[in-house]
Amino acid sequence: MTSRSSIPRSSIQRTGVVLALIVFAACLFYIGKGHVLFLDTNGITIDGKEFRSYASVTVSVDGKELDSPMGRAERAMVTVSGPRHKIVIADDAGAGNKVEKTFTIPTFTGRVLVSIPALLGGAPAEHWIAPFTPRPAERAPAEKMQRYQDPGRE
Amino acid sequence: MKRLRLFFIENAVVILFVILISIAIPASRLPGKFLLQEILTRLGRSSFLVIALLLPIMAGMGLNFGMVLGAMAGQIGLIFVMDWEIIGIPGLLLAMLISLPISIFLGWLCGSIMNRAKGREMVTGFILGFFMNGIYMLFALYAMGSIIPVMNPELLLSRGYGIRNVVDLISVRQALETFIPLRVAGLNIPVLNYLLIAGVSVFIVWFRKTKFGQDMRAAGQDRAVAGAAGIAVDRTRIIAVIVSTVLAGFGQIIFLQNLGTINTTNSHEQIGLFSIATLLIGGASVTKASIPNAFVGVVLFHLLFLVAPMAGKNLIGSAMLGEYFRQFVSYGVIAVALVLYEWKRLAQEENSRSRLWGGKADAL
Amino acid sequence: MEQIKRFIADFGLPRVIIAVYLLGLFLMTPMVDVSLWGALSDVFTRIGMNGIMVLALIPMIQSGCGLNFGLSLGVIAGLLGATFSIEMGYVGVWGFIFAILVSQVFGAIFGFGYGTLLNCVKGGEMMIATYVGFSSVMIMSIAWLVLPYKSPVMIWGYGGEGLRTTISVEGFWRHILDDFLSFPIAGYRFPTGAILFFILVSFVIWAFFHLKTGTAMTAVGSNPIYARASGISVNRMRIISVIISTMLGAMGIIVYQQSFGFIQLYDGPLYMAFPAVAAILIGGAGVNKASLTNVFLGVTLYQGILTMTPLIFNAVLKLDMSDVIRIIVSNGMILYALTRKMKVLK
């Protein structure tokens, strides 16, 4: 470590270690990146095809079942990490329809909307899974309400 | 008989605390199982930080008050990981990787500054901790979100830049403790924490035995002799501080993921005080510390931590009193350790001087 | 150019930077609509408030005991004096004088014990002083809880125990010095009394260091072996310096309280030593040499920065960075003093 001749070798080693650590960090980022899945049971119409909502479905993501079955027009939030995930949906009503799908989420997409009726109805992946951006329209009424409430608070 | 007496003298601090705690535990009326669980958790939470202090002691640089620098680096790593939303163990590992270059730089800085202030490394490290706290605040409260992009607006203060006072570590909270769940007799054992602590202990033992570790201890014994023997003393000391700072950064990440929140502006401040007091309560001194000292210290210090407020409340009717007493003990044990160290050093100096001058004293 | 270089070398680069920075802040006052006179009045009030605490550091630096990070011990003596005075119900000038007298007694006792301890640990005073100070603050916190004070002004009204965390001195001796002979400048008060008192105490210290004991003390600090050879008791001189430092610290905190308006107990004194240490170092003192000039210059520059930074930054950037700047400047100064080679600046 101290002898003069070893300096080039050690600098190569150092660069190697630093590069390896950077690669390792990138891997950690890739497998650890968190995503929020919004599971949505609302009926949905895609390309004129209508997917009806189900009365009650049991959903599990990556082997973990949600606390309670989901009814109509519900939205549940699940946090997952990494790119690949497995979702299992079982229709609790008579038909006993059960679907198991694996899907990938792009690393830099933080929030993802999963439409359960579309998934159960067998729509192609690009239709039942979509990046989720909160619609400004949703926020506006809440903001208005807050502004309305403000004077009363004081 | 003589050996027994020596044992008591050498372990005076530990024995004193054992007595103190054996009075305080019954007075606190806390259930034994609760205390046992807390101690198991706290061993997993704090031991790593305490072990981070060992190397500079071996290098003769005293108690590394500069370890708060590492704690700051660890917190910066965690803040970035929270911003990027990296979850669980990968998140913690990434936080450690981010803290690594920062810790190395800060450790190098700390070591170089201490080399300029030989003989007062401790007070210099202590003040350096305060100084760096200012830089850290500048970074966390002003640069984050303005110069350095922060994606997650929930981390920021409402004014639009600067990290919130409290950052919730929800996505990495207790990721280590829950990774290998193990319950024995109704007690949760944080297995992965213990594995990490075992790993760092082995590392310290190994490090001490390497050529470099030998040099380091030689430099710790006598700088002049080590220098004459061809050891690069300054460089050795810097590396000891760098390793200590890096370990402190990792330790802080382990510590905070267990607590589950960061107090952005002051989580790191008390870490130096608590870790150093812990090590000293475990029977270490300014010049001599071992891994068992760290574990004994964590158990004793945290028992006191747990029972002091309740004991104070039950004995005198004031919980604040127990709290102040605990703080007094933290500060006091450091004061006592430093006094003993300087006192011994002076006595040695006096001794060697009188030997040197012994012959001439009559002539004068 | 050479002259400027030499001037900077003599004056110390950090001091030059701080002085230029402060000057810049003052020059900016008219531009940002901040009253220069108001700012100056604030600066002088703070100088009067903190001056004696900075002065308290001189004896220990001169006798070779280093920076007195254990000044909190003196502060505790001052708190005892102040609370005793209020407990006895003395008001006005007599209350203030009584508080100082009591604090001096405690300061002497504490200083003696503290000095004796420091004599056992020559060379490691600074770190030990810090932690002795810290642990005494905690012991006193317990004392504030259990001491049998009765004055309703000071104890918690109901449901609490012990003394309040902050006690107002309004109605006792608030602004007793600040208002003495004070006169308005452009509508702002000049704290004549406090400044005069600071000058008076400084003069006493100056005179002391020109008397036999004072010169002996300086000799002990600059060359202990020579001092011992000429028959001066090194240990005795060091203890005297610590006693004086602690007593001045006690007086300093009472002067601080009369201006601030409150007595801060419990954790209050924990970090009291650090601003004082930073101030004297900014003034150019070294770890073992300090003069009155260092004190005057230091307290002016340091308190000037503390007053002006938030004023200007708030006005210009709408941003309060004063706390961060205070931390960086004061600890940076201490760090600089600890690491530089021992050369004393004029």
Image (spheres, coloured by chain):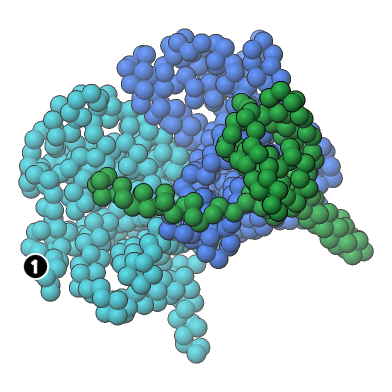
Q: Nearer the viewer, residue A90 or B100?
A: A90
Q: Pick the residue in front: B30 or C305.
A: B30
What colour denotes chain B? blue
Q: Give above or below for A78 relative to B194.
A: below
Residue at image position (40%, 40%) is C133
Q: Quadrant of residue B90?
A: top right
Q: What residue lies at 64% left-to-right and 15% top-to-bottom?
A: B187
Give the left or right position of residue B216, taking residue C230 as reference.
right
Tell me the kind of residue under disc 1.
Phe
Q: Is residue B263 left or right of residue C206?
A: right
Quadrant including the N terminus of chain B: top right
Q: Which chain is cyan?
A: C
| Residue B15 vertical position relative to residue C246 in the rendered view, above or below | above
Q: Is residue B85 visible?
A: yes
List the residue tagged with mark 1.
C183
Instruction: Report in which chain the residue with disc 1 lies.
Output: C
The correct choice, above or below, for C280 with respect to B260 in the image is below
Above or below, comparing residue C125 to residue A97 in the picture: below
Local packing at callout 1 (Cα closer than 10 Å; few below 14, some 14-19, many 20+) is few
| The chain in green | A
- Measured as percent of width and height from the top left, residue C233 is found at 40, 46
Measured as percent of width and height from the top left, residue B5 is found at: 62, 15
Residue C103 in picture, x, y percent from top left: 22, 40
**Residue B353 in picture, x, y percent from top left:** 60, 43
The answer to whether any part of residue B221 appears in the image is no
